Image (cartoon, rainbow, N blue to C red):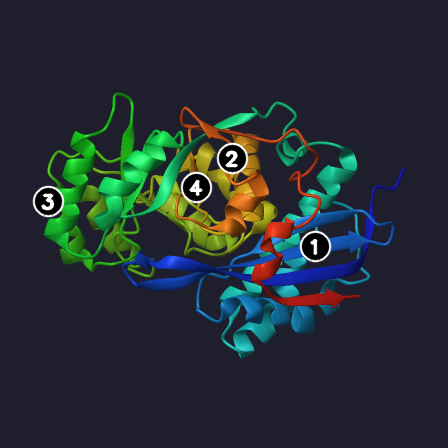
Amino acid sequence: MDASVHIARIDAWAFRSPVESPVATSFGLMYDRPAVFVRIEDRDGAFGWGEIWANWPAAGAEHRVNLLEKDLAPLILGRKVSEPGVLFHPLERDSHIRAVQCGEQGPFRQVIAGVDMALWDLFARRAGKPLRHFINDNAPDRVPTYASGIQVSAAARMVPAARAAGYRMFKLKVGFDRAADIAALRAVHGALDAGEKLAADANQAWDFGAAAAFLSDLGEIPLEWLEEPIPVFSAPSTWAELAALSRVTLAGGENLAGTQEFSDAIAAGSLRVIQPDVAKWGGITGCLEVAQAAIGADRRYCPHFLGGGLGLTASAELLAAVGGDGALEVDVNPNPLRTAFYGDAEPVDGGMWTCSQAPGLGVERIPEALLPYETLHREIH
């Protein structure tokens, strides 16, 4: 029996949810929470959902929808697809020149990631299996998770709230003021319950000297990892030097893109925690390859994610499918574009995320509660 699908229609939506307080990183503020969702349908009516990364620039969400409609949909519509991952590398190849021409490699990669995610959802849904079991029949139904998006100055309030919501590991955003950052990490660590863990994310805030100074001041505070202490484009020798002097594991990957970049990073060994983002590059196809390579090289695969509910669910399903000792990143800042997919509360208890038993990603339609936040919708066929 031919299991191929013929892609007949694509729908894409941009959403923006207002926030009471901007979400702070070391490189900028988010004044609302955007998300781009994509739905792919075949000529028989089967469908799948995906998410396209759109956090930056501030005007990026609507741009991604238009980019999908004008530049990538003509390469997708009408295609016969035999397996969910077979379009990923051809789309990268066929769109490469125009992405270079306009200097927008990132947005093209992000749109392709969302399309790839939707195709995996479609095929898993047709097979009647949750995505994790479509990839790996023996995948578990629960994965470890951690609370993310905790701005260091708000840690005294946000960590107890995350603990009450079921989390047992917490990641603080640092890179603002070194002394204050260290003091907050020390205070949070001192208040951890037995078995709880702490990590930190600098979002590329420092040069080598500042990162080394932070690590020195950190002293004996145990961190699961320190994420992106220096810019991702720093020389491999700089990363290696920092890793050699650090007693804390270094992590990164959300700003890497392409099979070769991840292969080089895994081989170099400076990053012991590998963190690709399914909506930013790779979708399921690329991130599955990276996750398997990372685990095979004795690295830890911990998917990065800070967006809406579709990409978060896909990240959980992929983590369950590949195994290892990684943990799922869950933003704990208010965001209905995330929580509405879970009945306003993520399925977290005792530090574990419980995956759905529904086919694919388990999503039939965009929750009605999100419709007031819609800023753009395109039907493409």
- Crowd rating for badge 2 (residues with CA inside 10 Å; few <14, some 14–19, many 20+): many
Q: Which mark is residue 330?
A: 4
Q: Which residue is mark 2?
A: 319
Query: Which marked residue is nearer to the observer: mark 2 or mark 1?
Result: 1
| Vertical arrangement, residue 100 with respect to residue 45, above or below | below
Task: Provide the secondary structure element on which disc 3 rests.
Answer: helix
Query: Which marked residue is nearer to the observer: mark 2 or mark 4?
Result: 4
Task: Provide the secondary structure element on which disc 1 rests.
Answer: strand
Say whether residue 86 is left or right of residue 153. right
Residue type marked 2: Leu
Q: Position of residue 319 (x, y in %)?
A: 51, 35
Give whichever of 68, 83 is nearer the camera: 68
| Vertical arrangement, residue 26 with respect to residue 195, above or below | below
Q: Compute the Cα span from label 4 to label 1.
A: 23 Å
Task: Provide the secondary structure element on which disc 2 rests.
Answer: helix
Dots 2, 3 in contact, CB < 8 A: no
